[in-house]
Image: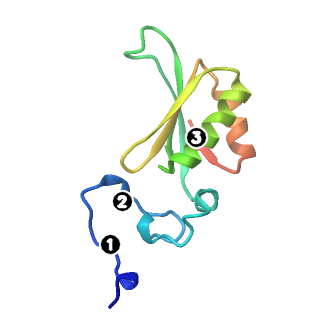
Amino acid sequence: MGEDDAELVYSTDPERNKRCLKCKKLFPECRCRNHPESCEAESERTAVIRLENANRGGKTVTVIDQLPPTEIYLEKLARKLKNRCGSGGTFRTGNPYGFIEIQGDKRELIRQVLLEEGIRCKG
């Protein structure tokens, strides 16, 4: 078996242990690595929208949780949501999921944008 045939079994680097949502392989062996947005577009996940204000100095934040944990996907979606809502925000990748935070109570507008993108949502 040559080095090209070798397959990663385990790594201590958490980034290398993530799996592609489309082909279910680890990202280093992923066939769709060059097209990460296609992996998330076919995702069967349902985004959860909730309002948070604990530990935020009294400010309200709309959180979109249980999104695919791919940084490129989250960055693109967060940018679109921030532009449509006219407010600031950020995104983070978690262990099994990624999430986006948008400043203010923007649940209805976010729900519309997610439905336009073909992302199911609840909350």
The amino acid type found where label 2 is placed reads: Arg
The amino acid type found where label 1 is placed reads: Leu
The amino acid type found where label 3 is placed reads: Glu
What is the crowding at mark 1: few (fewer than 14 residues within 10 Å), some, or many (at least 20)? Answer: few
Marks 3 and 1 sit apart, C-alpha to C-alpha, by 27 Å
Query: Along the horizontal axis of the image, is 99 left or right of 121?
Result: left
User: Residue furthest toward the bottom?
Assistant: 1
Tag 2 residue: 16
Figure check: 117 above or below 100: below
Question: Under tag 2, what secondary structure?
Answer: helix
Q: Which quarter shows the N terminus? A: bottom left
Q: Residue at x 31, y 53 (%)?
A: 14
Tag 1 residue: 8
Q: Does residue 58 appear in the picture of this structure? A: yes
User: Residue furthest toward the left?
Assistant: 12
Tag 3 residue: 75
Q: Residue at x 38, y 85 (%)?
A: 5
Q: Residue 54's image quarter?
A: top left
Marks 3 and 2 sit apart, C-alpha to C-alpha, by 19 Å
User: Residue furthest toward the top?
Assistant: 58
